[in-house]
Image (tube, rainbow, N blue to C red):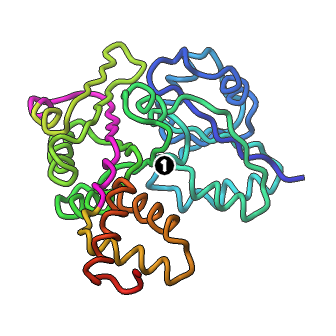
């Protein structure tokens, strides 16, 4: 019988947010793989639990080497608990390699849901949350960062980023340059901690605020790009589009309605363009 890989969310600030199942898993797991074993000791001390299983480190520097070892334990029937310093494993934290390897080996993978800086920041931002995308950390080099931001400048969904406090000002300045000074955003720092703060405003304003220095764990939420303004079409072009639809078999009334909807103009404006084209003979297919 193979074992089970358990991904457990840990508090992002307030230890009281730890889910009850986390304590149970820490006490019962055969192996606890932790991003930082020192932080794990502080967490278990705060929760009043003593892991009975083997505790190993699992961080960016040893992921590749340690993953086969953990998969071997799982194949042998062990229950392996994976925790990171804060939040859910695999979300800009170690975990993806182990999950992928476990899935490939046919190992069951489950989770203990817990706090998430991404969802918490989204909820507090005051920005639309019905559709969003998580972009993680931006590249440190200015050119690479600008290129990454350019790729999503027209993205309509709300964007979520992690950033180090000492790079926040230059990050927000780069965002203002790529997205526009007035793009709404929110900087969320120290979420669920004593000095929690959510700063909302246009990107340029937030960049100016951040130049004085900001401390703590940072999550940045940026509004998606506003809808593009409809293309302004000349009366002749409106008439040509109606003619094209008519040639394809549409009735004129339906063609006018469709062209008006596509162009974002009243149907009367399209109708007048068709009448004018008919009088002048300027649009093929109109008679």
Q: Residues within 10 Å of mark 1 (few under 14, many from 20)?
A: some
User: What residue span does the magenta drawing correspond to?
Assistant: 209-230
Residue 266 appears at what percent x and percent y? 36, 53
Closer to the camera in the image, 227 or 275:
275
Closer to the camera in the image, 27 or 173:
173
The residue lying at 38 percent from left, 51 percent from top is 156
Q: Secondary structure at mark 1?
A: loop
The residue lying at 39 percent from left, 51 percent from top is 135
The quarter holding residue 115 reads top right
Magenta-colored segment: predominant secondary structure: loop
* Left or right side of 31 for 46: left
* Left or right side of 38 for 153: left
Closer to the camera in the image, 210 or 265:
265
Residue 121 belongs to the span the image colors magenta: no
160 up-or-down from 106: above or below? above
Residue 133 appears at what percent x and percent y? 45, 48
The residue lying at 79 percent from left, 60 percent from top is 106
286 up-or-down from 25: above or below? below
The residue lying at 42 percent from left, 35 percent from top is 128
* Left or right side of 92 for 231: left
The quarter holding residue 207 reads top left
Q: Which residue is mark 1?
A: 59
């Amino acid at each position: 019988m193979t074992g089970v890989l358990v991904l457990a969310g840990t508090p992002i600030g307030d230890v009281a947010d730890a889910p009850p199942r986390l304590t149970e898993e820490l006490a019962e797991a055969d192996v606890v793989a932790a991003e930082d074993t020192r932080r794990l000791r502080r967490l278990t001390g705060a929760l009043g639990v003593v892991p009975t299983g083997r505790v190993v480190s699992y961080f960016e520097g040893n992921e590749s080497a340690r993953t086969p070892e953990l998969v071997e334990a799982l194949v042998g029937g062990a229950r392996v608990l994976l925790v990171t310093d804060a939040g859910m494993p695999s979300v800009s934290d170690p975990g993806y390699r182990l999950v992928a390897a476990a899935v490939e080996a046919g190992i069951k993978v489950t989770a203990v849901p817990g706090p998430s800086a991404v969802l918490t920041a989204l909820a507090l931002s005051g920005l639309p949350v019905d559709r969003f995308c998580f972009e993680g950390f931006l590249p440190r080099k200015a050119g690479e960062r600008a290129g990454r931001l350019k790729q999503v400048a027209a993205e309509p969904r709300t964007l979520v980023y992690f950033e180090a406090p000492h790079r926040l000002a230059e990050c927000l300045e780069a965002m203002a340059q790529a997205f526009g000074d007035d793009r709404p955003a929110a900087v969320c720092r120290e979420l669920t901690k004593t000095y929690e703060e959510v700063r909302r405003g246009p990107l340029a304003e937030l960049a100016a605020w951040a130049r004085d220095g900001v401390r703590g764990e940072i999550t940045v939420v940026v509004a998606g790009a506003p809808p593009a303004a409809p293309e302004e079409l000349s009366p002749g072009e409106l008439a040509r589009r109606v003619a094209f639809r008519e040639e394809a078999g549409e009735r004129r009334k339906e063609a006018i309605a469709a062209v008006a909807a596509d162009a974002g103009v009243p149907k009367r404006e399209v109708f007048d363009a068709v009448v004018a084209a008919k009088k002048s003979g300027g649009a093929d297919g109109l008679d």
